[in-house]
Image (cartoon, rainbow, N blue to C red):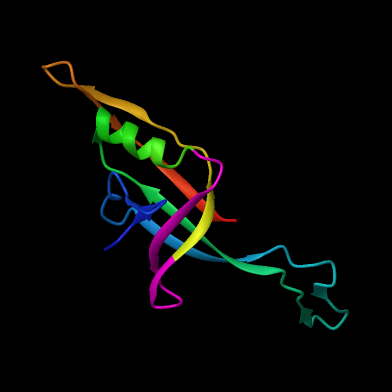
Amino acid sequence: MELKINGEEIAAYPAPEGLTITTLDLDDGEASGRTTDGTMSRSRIAVKRQIQMQFSALPWATASALLRQVEDEFVNATYPDPVTGKYETKSFYVGDRPALVALEDLDGSLWWSGIQFTLTEQ
């Protein structure tokens, strides 16, 4: 599988079952709603992608490289799109990026766990 951020391979791949790609229908317009007989009408504004990634514990250098890849206001991400059936590259913004210190090795190396983030198409 290919995952890239700004044209570079992602620093760490998500944990098994740690990659979720969601197709979002964004903000139905004010014309959307139900009539008195219960019929739904919609005025969809856009269809966007959202990519959620969760990672296994990572050594400090890898965690740092990964988080630096998504620190810009917007990033271009290349990912396998389940709707189009091919790799797509689109502009995304990133949400919160929690990281918990998992453990310290005997040699003093830190490992980070719980790293996860969501990329939402611009």
Q: Does 79 appear in magenta? A: yes
Residue 14's x, y, as percent?
Answer: 30, 50
Q: Is residue 49 left or right of residue 11?
A: right
Q: What's the magenta region?
A: 72-88
Q: Does 106 appear in magenta? A: no
- Seen in the picture, residue 46 relative to 118 is either above or below; the reply is below
Quarter placement of the C terminus: bottom right
Q: Which residue sits furthest left?
A: 106
Give the image quarter of residue 33.
Answer: bottom right
Give the image quarter of residue 102.
Answer: top left
Quarter placement of the N terminus: bottom left
Front-most of residues 82 and 74: 74
Residue 88's x, y, as percent?
Answer: 43, 68
Q: Is residue 116 left or right of residue 60?
A: right
Number of numbered discs on residues = 0
Q: Residue at x 84, y 72 (%)?
A: 31
Q: Residue at x 79, y 83 (%)?
A: 39
Front-most of residues 40 and 97: 97
Residue 16's x, y, as percent?
Answer: 26, 54
Q: Is residue 35 left or right of residue 42?
A: right
- Seen in the picture, residue 66 relative to 78 is either above or below; the reply is above
- Seen in the picture, residue 57 relative to 81 is either above or below; the reply is above
Q: Residue at x 46, y 37 (%)?
A: 97
